[in-house]
Amino acid sequence: MNEKAQQLLESLANAQRYFVHFIRISIFIVMAWIGGLKAFQYEADGIVPFVANSPFMSFFYTKDAPEYQQYKNKEGEVVPKNIAWHEENGTYIFSYALGAVIIAIGLLTLLGIYNARIGLLGGLLTVGMSIVTLSFLITTPEVYVPNLGGPDHGFPYLSGAGRLVLKDIIMMAGGLVVASDAASRILKQQNATHSATVPAHRQQVGQLVE
């Protein structure tokens, strides 16, 4: 292996902890951006199929699936009749609350750069949120191409919504990496504290023996 390749390998290996922090920053950017968009009508409308069909979240809405299919708004479209239905459904209130939770998880993950215990919580919450999101691949019909006469429909043919959901497996992996890193830092802190207290305790015991 030539010298430049060796230097590259060493640089990448030595920068690992910075890359883990970059994962934290990336998770925060995604969470803050997407969470912030939950305050807008088009985004709140867009998550209705996922929430309405989810056994974990559907109780937040007042209307049952698949009634929402009659009141869909295209992104950027404003239809008063559809807006009124979503207001009755609790679409917007739920979206505001969900957005706040997502931003909070992103912030906790980001703070893991400075505080391992907070970062551990953020990483685990990121994993939990990703599990819920990935469950949409089972519960939401819209994640697969509908049967409109073509040969490619249903499983495993992901629609645009399905491809978006599937990417959360990367978010889950990122959450596990930062949670593992935070746990490792906590253990090191505990070991350092233990190592510092043991000699002091032995010194006290020695004084008593004398």
Image: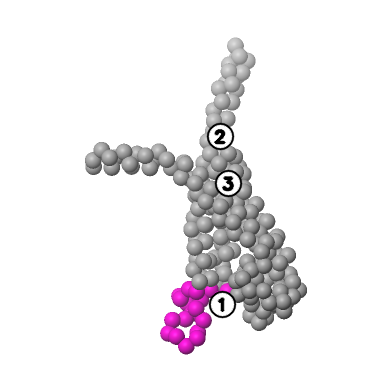
Alpha carbons under labels 3 and 1: distance apart: 34 Å
Residue 135 position by quadrant: bottom right
User: Label 3 belongs to which residue?
Assistant: 110
Which of pointers 2 and 3 lies earlier in the amino acid sequence? 3
Q: Around disc 2, counting alpha carbons within 10 Å, would you say few (fewer than 14), some (14 to 19), or many (20 or more)?
A: few
Q: Residue 63: image x %, image y %?
A: 72, 76
Q: Which mark is residue 189?
A: 2
Name the residue rendered at 51%, 81% in the picture.
Answer: 146
Visible residue check, residue 135 = yes
Give the label on residue 141, or none: 1
Quadrant housing residue 9: top left
The stretch in magenta equals 140-159
Q: What amino acid does circle 1 point to?
A: Pro
Q: Image height check: is 100 above or below 111? A: below
Q: Residue furthest left?
A: 2
Mark 2–mark 3 Cα distance, whole angstroms, equals: 20 Å
Is residue 19 a member of the stretch shown in magenta?
Answer: no
Residue that extends furthest to the right in the rendered view of this protein: 88
Assign a secondary structure to mark 2.
Answer: helix
